[in-house]
Structures are given as C-alpha cells and as structure tokens.
Image (tube, coloured by chain):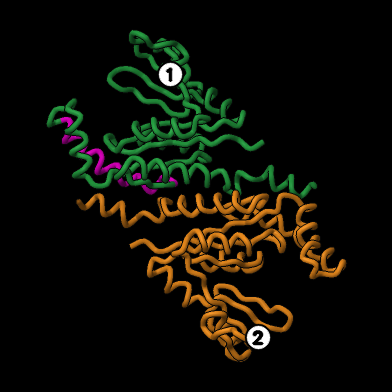
Chain colours: A orange, B green
Amino acid sequence: MDNGLLVVISGPSGAGKGTICARLKEEFSELKVSVSATTRKPREGEVEGISYYFLKEEDFIKKINDDEFLEYAKVYGNYYGTPKQEVFRQLEEGNDIILEIDIQGALQVKKNYPRGVFIFILPPSLYELNKRIEGRGTDSKEVIMKRMQCAYDELNYAFEYDYVVVNDQVETAVQQIKHIIHAEKSRAIRKKAIINKVREV
Amino acid sequence: MDNGLLVVISGPSGAGKGTICARLKEEFSELKVSVSATTRKPREGEVEGISYYFLKEEDFIKKINDDEFLEYAKVYGNYYGTPKQEVFRQLEEGNDIILEIDIQGALQVKKNYPRGVFIFILPPSLYELNKRIEGRGTDSKEVIMKRMQCAYDELNYAFEYDYVVVNDQVETAVQQIKHIIHAEKSRAIRKKAIINKVREV
C-alpha cells in the first residue's frame, strides 16, 4: 500500500491557515490531525492525547535530543512540537495527515520529511493582511507592525514550498487545496506499488 | 503573467489516451491543441494549419536540423512532429496546451520543456490492455503480441513522468487529470509573478 500524504498548511500569521484547515477537515473527513506535544500546562477542558501530549520540560528536551520531533519551537517560554512517531505511524497506515504550522516549523518538517506536500497560504495583499490582523483586535500597534514586517520577510520562503495558494476567498482556496491533495495522490513517486501491480498481472 | 501549462498525456498504446484527451477538451474549453507537422499527404477534408502543417520531407528535415521540434518521429515512412514555435507562442500568451503523444515523444518533450506536466496513462492491467487492443479489431495477432511486449517495457518509463493516472473508468481518470491541471496552476515555481505582486502592494 502507498503511504498517506502529509499535507502541511503554512504561511504568515493572518493568512488564514486556521480557517482553511477547519474547512478542509470538514471536506475530507478522513484527514487526520496530528496531536502536538507541549510543556505548557493543560487549560480547563483540554485532554491529554487529544488536545496535546502534555510533557515536563525535561522530557520534552530529551525528545529534542533524541530527534523525536518533526519540528518544534519555544514560544513564550513553552515548548511545542510535532512528534515524529505519531505522524509516521499514521502515514504508514495509509492515513493522510494535515499539519497547520508556521513557516519556521514547516521548513523543519520539510527537512525531516521532504515527501510531504507543502502548501504556502498567501494573503491576497499585504494591505489585506494588515486589515485582517487589525481586525482581530488582539494585537497592539507595535505587535501588528512586527507581524507585518515578519510577513513581508516570510514571503521569500514561498518558493521553498510545493504550492502557493492565494487566500482571497476561503472557499476558492479550499477548492484549490482539494485539487492539490487529489493530484498529489497521482504523483508518479507515490505510484510504485500500483505500477508494479499492473506489470504482475 | 504566468505562462500557460503544457499538459502531456502519454502512455502505452491502448491505455486510452485518445478518449481521455477528447473528454478533457470538452471539460476545459480553453485547452488548446497544438497542430502537428507531417510529411504525409493530406487526406480528403484535411486542412493545412488545422489538421496538420503539411511539409515536404526536405523542409521537415531542415526543421529537425534547426532544432525546431519539441519532438518528432518517423512512422511508416512519414515524419510527424510538434513545432516548438507554435507551442511556445501559445504558452507565452498564457494558454494551456494539451499534447497527446506516445512515450518516446513525451520523453523528447520533457528534455526540451521540463516545465511541462507529464501524465502517464496506466491501463488497469495488462490483461485489460490486451482486451482493449484486441477489441479494436484492427491488429493482427502478431502486432498485438508486439504491442503487449512494448507496453510491458514502457511501464518502466512511468517513473519519469510527474503523474500516473490509472484509466480504469474514463470519467474517474478525467476527473483526476482535472485535479492535476488545477493543482499545477498553484505550483510555487509558477507563482513568482503573484508573490512579487503581493509584496509590492
């Protein structure tokens, strides 16, 4: 059997990764989401192994040293990471997995699993991105400025991805990613099993 | 503006390339078909520049020497070829082009235009392929044997293509190729213009 697809949805903050992933999970009920590990304390209602794997910092660092993460990062004093073992097991079982992740994380995943499908979500314009981040109402002017500068710099990384999808209309972007997922299942590199099967008969 | 796509539909004889291309042209009315050049005599009803460009053998050979073909072949004493100029002009105008072509031709096109989208049409089994070729009723037992041996050998080339589409049901194969064409329009390598546009605003 051919392995499942690891679909990585990434892009600058405010590009709309979250909304797109939520819609994709509705469309592809068979898409699995990988559970991340973190050292932050569980919040009310969060369940071990479903919301996150909650780890002590020393255990997390040991896993870093043992190369057990597809990617990880430290954010505001807490570690977050995607465990390799979990993801690879799902892929081997033929399940497709979706990862929503920032650009630094996606580049780490690409190093560890170049066969993934890397999709960069592009805001239609920096003006629009600015409007969206302001619209959230959660960030100070200074933070917004920083995010914008960061987004501008991050556009450089788009060329390291396999696909670039403009998120002008969410539904159009979701349709586009559906096409990509279907198409990727036909990539010749993933078809070894079926080609050999045809030859045998 | 980004260039159009050159979509190359290829595969063993009897895999169903022709039927699939006809359906694709119905689905994508904007898909252009490139007009081939040939040294064979026009048949009744064939129109210069629409059915083929009809060339004298000496002119065809001059064009070969001037590297003016994306691919060419000599079949039963006549030359057939795909003129570069025609195809490249269409692509530069942003038009998508579809080429239905045998495997040797496709490999030549890949050398000359690696940015093309190369799709290998795979019969569901060699048994089914045999049935289809016999079903045509046009080939002798000996020719069928040769075609089957050739198809078996040609399966090796599937891995040199970008995509492999199994033609079990024509409609499923056509849908799959539709996904591929849409997905390819989002390839990061084709998105330079739009990424730069976002950065400018």
Q: Can residue A83 be seen in this view?
A: yes
Q: Can residue A114 be seen in this view?
A: no
Q: Residue A40, labelled with which disc? A: 2
For this view, does B171 lie left or right of residue B2? left
Quadrant in which the N terminus of chain A appears: bottom left
Q: Give the range drawn in magenta.
A: B143-162
Circles 2 and 1 in contact, beta carbons < 8 Å: no
Q: Can you identify the residue that label 1 sits on?
A: B37
In the depicted structure, whether residue A116 falls above or below residue B72: below
Q: What element carries label 2?
A: loop
Between B113 and A188, the residue placed more toward the observer is A188
- At 61% across and 82% down in the image, what residue appears? A38
For this view, does A101 lie left or right of residue B180? right
* Amino acid type of the residue tagged 1 in the rendering: Ala
Residue A16 magenta-highlighted: no
Q: Main secondary structure of the magenta part?
A: helix
Q: In which quarter of the image is residue B101?
A: top left
For this view, does A190 lie left or right of residue B3? left
Q: Distance from label 2 to label 1 (Cα)?
A: 68 Å
In the depicted structure, whether residue B72 falls above or below residue A190: above
Label 1 marks a residue whose chain is B
Label 2 marks a residue whose chain is A
